[in-house]
Amino acid sequence: MSRNFRQSIRIARTNLDGAKKSAYALSGVKGIGIRLANVIVEKAGLDPDTRLGFLSDGEVGKIEKIPENPAKHDVPSWLFNRQEDRETGNDIHLIGPEIDLHVKADLDLMKSTNSWRGYRHSYGLKVGVRRRGPQGEKGKLWGSRKEKLLKKGLDCDHKNNFSITPSEKICSAKTLLSGWVQMGN
């Protein structure tokens, strides 16, 4: 067993830091969280306190095989990130760029079937939020607040940046501040 330290180790098409403990380093792979990384290290039969850079090529090979097919290595299916896949119906776990491809395919499917979520995705609107209040509605002010600001000579653009209307020539900071105090802001 070689004890040469390697600074960087490539696992699942990702360069990982060899100075970190094995589970924490594995969580750097897209699709592998800390909980799944701990299970992978346990299933590979490795010491969880070992730094990733000190692992031999054989031990790294064991670690690489488990995320490729976790069901084969008795990893619980509730840890998988794609349960009951639409195409196959099986529980699978995706890592790396496979996640992005499957998410894009899911969004395209929602858009083509004209589902509500697909409609909101296609128009760039928020999806799956509670519809109460102006959360996420950029640049909108509610009701009488905007009217009060306009009466005081303040105007706001679409990003809620306040400025003096062109009708007022020069306004001192003191006058502007007193207007804000009178409004109760």
Image: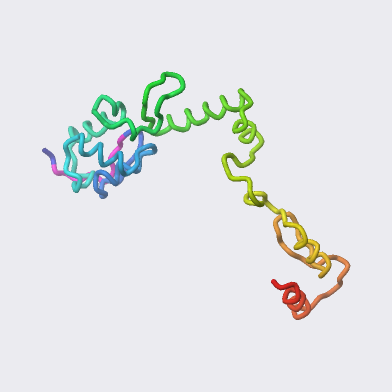
Question: Which part of the image, by quadrant, shows the C terminus?
Answer: bottom right
Please give the name of the residue rendered at 66% of the width and 36% of the height, measured from the top-left corner.
Answer: 123
Please give the name of the residue rendered at 76% of the width and 60% of the height, measured from the top-left corner.
Answer: 156
In the image, 118 versus 95, the foreground residue is 118
Please give the name of the residue rendered at 72% of the width and 53% of the height, measured from the top-left corner.
Answer: 140
Would you say residue 47 sits in the magenta stretch? no
Question: Which part of the image, by quadrant, shows the N terminus?
Answer: top left
Q: Say if 180 sits above or below 64 in the image.
A: below
Left or right, 170 with respect to 177, comes to right
Specify start and end residues of the magenta stretch as a single range. Answer: 3-11
- The percent coordinates of residue 41 (x first, y second) are 22, 39
- The percent coordinates of residue 114 (x first, y second) are 64, 26
- Color encoding of the figure: rainbow
User: What is the quadrant of residue 4 in the picture?
Assistant: top left
Left or right, 72 with respect to 158, comes to left
| Total numbered labels | 0
Q: Say if 109 sits above or below 163 in the image.
A: above
- The percent coordinates of residue 167 (x first, y second) are 88, 67
Identify the residue at the far left of this view.
Answer: 1
Please give the name of the residue rendered at 26% of the width and 24% of the height, measured from the top-left corner.
Answer: 72
